[in-house]
Image: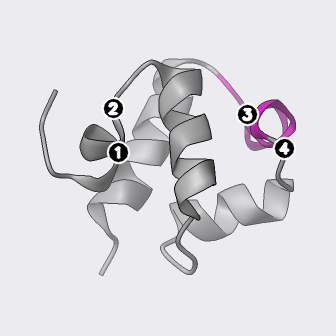
Amino acid sequence: MTSTFSVRLKELRREYGVGQVELAKNIGVSKGIISLWENGLREPSMSNLIALAKFFSVSVDYLVGLTDM
């Protein structure tokens, strides 16, 4: 089962029109890590969650499914 985080990450990336490679470069991880996160095969560290939240201007709570805003 795909996690809320995986779904939201993929949705945000598509909404912002950002590819996996571009996102990976912006937050300092590999493209493969982005793919693993989006497929629910790995979970990001807290520092990576914060980097993603800042990049997309959303809260960590939103990314992990604790809020809908």
Which quadrant would residue 8 be assigned to in this image? top left
Asked whether the residues under the numbered discs 1 and 2 touch, taking CB atoms below 8 Å apart as contact, a structural biologist would say yes
Residue drawn at x 58%, y 64% as measured from the top left = 45
Residue 54 numbered mark, or none: none
Give the labeled residue for mark 3. Answer: 19
Crowding at label 4, few (<14), some or many (≥20) Cα neighbours within 10 Å? few
Q: Give the alpha-carbon distance from disc 4 to disc 1, as whole Å.
A: 18 Å
- What is the three-letter code of the residue carrying label 3? Gly
Residue 50 located within the stretch drawn in magenta: no
Q: Position of residue 30 (x, y in %)?
A: 86, 56
Is 19 rendered above or below residue 16?
below
**Mark 1 or mark 2, whichever is nearer to me:** 2
Q: Which residues are magenta?
A: 18-27
First in residue order: circle 1 vs circle 3? 3
Residue 7 is left or right of residue 40, and the answer is: left
Q: Position of residue 59 (x, y in %)?
A: 33, 32
Label annotation for residue 59? 2
The number of discs equals 4
Residue in the foreground of this view, choosing between 11 and 59: 59
Alpha carbons under labels 1 and 3: distance apart? 18 Å
Q: Amino acid at mark 4?
A: Gly
Image height check: is 47 above or below 59? below
Q: Which residue is mark 1?
A: 63
Q: Amino acid at mark 2?
A: Ser
Task: Calculate the distance from the C-alpha at mark 1 to the C-alpha at mark 2.
Answer: 7 Å
User: Which tag is nearer the camera, tag 3 or tag 4?
Assistant: 4
State the separation of the CA atoms marked 3 and 2: 21 Å
Name the residue beneath numbered marker 4: 28
Q: CA distance from mark 3 to mark 4?
A: 14 Å
